Amino acid sequence: MRWKQWFGRTGVSAAHKTFDFSFDRSYMSLETAALGLGIALESAMLASVRMKEGVLVPVFDASHAVEVGAHNLVYPPQNAELPRIARFITWIEREVGGMARKT
């Protein structure tokens, strides 16, 4: 999730907000925040190790958390016929209730 989306979901106008840092990798935003150079907008799961260490602390309680359903399982197309890939896909589809596989 990007800041603009988070601001929108929490009702904060972000039309004119600019940021000194912007990363496309979670670890970079978390490490930048851990170094004291800003605040990271990141999943609690990815930030959990640094929070357990006491290096990072949440700004808000869970009431400001935003559910994001944007994760995908992906693999290189050349691996589509590998038996281990087929076994994994069969297993994960069964575990998540038979979600349709997109190919």
Image (cartoon, rainbow, N blue to C red):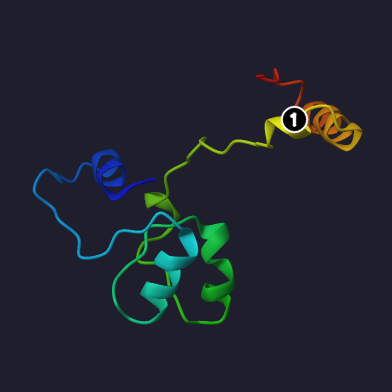
Give the crowd class for mark 1: few <14, some 14-19, many >=20 residues within 10 Å: few
Instruction: Name which residue lies at 59% across and 72% down.
Output: 49
Judged left or right of residue 73, residue 52 is: left
Q: Position of residue 37 (x, y in %)?
A: 29, 77
Instruction: Name which residue lies at 37% across and 51% down.
Output: 64
Q: Position of residue 44 (x, y in %)?
A: 52, 59
The quarter of the image holding the C terminus is: top right
Instruction: Name which residue lies at 51% across and 36% down.
Output: 70
Quarter of the rendering containing residue 82: top right
The quarter of the image holding the N terminus is: top left
Observer-nearest of 50 and 71: 71
Residue reaching furthest to the left? 16
Secondary structure category for the residue under label 1: loop
Judged left or right of residue 71, residue 8 is: left
Q: So how many labels did they put on this image? A: 1
Q: Position of residue 24 (x, y in %)?
A: 40, 54
Residue topped by disc 1: 96
Q: Is residue 72 above or below residue 63?
A: above
Judged left or right of residue 62, residue 100 is: right
Q: Position of residue 15 (x, y in %)?
A: 11, 43
Observer-nearest of 63 and 57: 57
Residue reaching furthest to the front? 78
Three-letter residue code for mark 1? Val
Q: Is residue 56 above or below residue 96?
A: below
Instruction: Name which residue lies at 36% across and 61% down.
Output: 60
